[in-house]
Image (cartoon, rainbow, N blue to C red):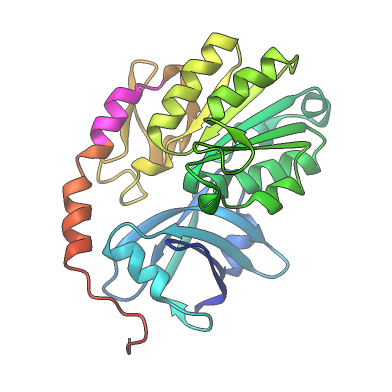
């Protein structure tokens, strides 16, 4: 039974759940994802692992309500159980292969946008625990859409909050803050960007201009989570790669973001139709 141990709405449409999944929690690593199937007839939904606790036997997922399937997941309450939670899937973050000496010489900067802030947390926490210096830039349209600020602030060396409207922290986007930090003398050895595809594209362009290597996570391309459906195909370094099984993290310099955004956009009509015909289960019998 994949029982929901806790549930919290981080924003009006973003929900954090801690789910009992002992075997998954004992083998999960930063950068990986899992698949949730809410009930017997539910769709398989790939979600990046936002935290894991082997001792408690739990994993944390963060879901944004977009269509009917995500709304179905969010409708579950503490004490109820999902039909399936499968994982960990995908490849762990590349920095897990580095030695303690290598990590101590690194200064990472994470650029997180929107829902992408949640999967940044386990990566930053792991790096912090293994001696790397880490800065985190969190971007959102307004302060009410910021998530994981306290959690990330506790495990990074410097937290930089940015809002498009200036309602909290730096007035502007995360890439502008990155440029300001570099101009002020910060020397980052590695960047990681997780968030909307367009944000990762401009983070990559900015890092290329500044001479900072960058890794991006293409988790938003996933559909079935196993590579069988082909929806996660993306061109990386001139070759076709599958984000589900060969990623989700890739060298940002090599990703064809324009192709990835076209592929991502082809499902918008289905998402809207699904949302339009969705019947809410909250407060109703299963």
Q: Does the magenta stretch include residue 220?
A: no
- Is 107 rendered above or below residue 5? above
Residue 58: give x, y in percent of width and height: 62, 67
Prevailing SS of the magenta stretch: helix
Taking the image as drawn, is residue 78 in sight?
yes
Q: Which residue extends farthest bottom?
A: 285
Residue at 43% x, 18% y: name it.
Answer: 254
Question: 170 or 28: which is nearer to us?
Answer: 170
Residue 169: give x, y in percent of width and height: 64, 38
Question: 275 or 38: which is nearer to us?
Answer: 275
Q: Is residue 259 magenta?
A: yes
Residue 231: give x, y in percent of width and height: 26, 41
Residue 235: give x, y in percent of width and height: 33, 23
Q: Would you say 243 lies left or right of 268 here? A: right
**What segment carries the magenta color?**
255-263
Taking the image as drawn, is residue 83 in sight?
no
Give the quadrant of residue 179: top right
- Is 144 rendered above or below residue 211? below
Q: Would you say 11 lies left or right of 30 here? A: left
Residue at 34% x, 21% y: name it.
Answer: 256
């Amino acid at each position: 039974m994949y029982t929901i141990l806790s549930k919290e709405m981080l924003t009006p449409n973003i929900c954090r759940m801690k789910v009992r999944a002992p075997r998954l929690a004992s083998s999960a690593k930063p950068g990986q994802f899992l698949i949730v199937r809410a009930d017997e007839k539910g769709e398989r939904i790939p979600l990046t692992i936002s935290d894991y606790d082997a001792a408690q036997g739990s994993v944390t997922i963060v879901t944004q309500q977009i269509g009917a399937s995500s709304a179905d997941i969010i409708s579950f309450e503490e004490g109820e159980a999902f039909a399936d939670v499968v994982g960990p899937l995908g490849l762990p973050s590349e920095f897990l292969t580095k030695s303690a000496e290598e990590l101590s010489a690194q200064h990472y900067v994470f650029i997180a946008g929107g829902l992408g802030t949640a999967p940044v947390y386990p990566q930053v926490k792991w790096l912090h625990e293994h001696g790397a210096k880490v800065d985190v830039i969190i971007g959102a349209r307004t302060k009410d859409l910021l998530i994981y600020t306290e959690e990330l602030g506790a495990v990074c060396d410097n937290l930089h909050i940015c809002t498009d409207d200036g309602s909290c922290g730096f007035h502007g986007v995360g890439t502008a803050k990155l440029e300001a930090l570099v101009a002020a003398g910060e020397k980052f050895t590695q960047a990681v960007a997780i968030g909307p595809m367009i944000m990762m594209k401009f983070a990559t362009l900015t890092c290329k201009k500044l001479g900072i290597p960058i890794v991006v996570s293409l988790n938003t391309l996933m559909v079935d989570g196993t590579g069988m459906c082909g929806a996660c195909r993306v061109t990386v370094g001139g070759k076709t790669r599958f984000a589900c099984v060969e990623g989700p993290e890739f060298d940002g310099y090599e990703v064809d973001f324009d192709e990835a955004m076209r592929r991502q956009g082809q499902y918008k009509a289905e998402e809207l139709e699904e949302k339009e015909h969705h019947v809410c289960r909250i407060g109703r019998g299963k």
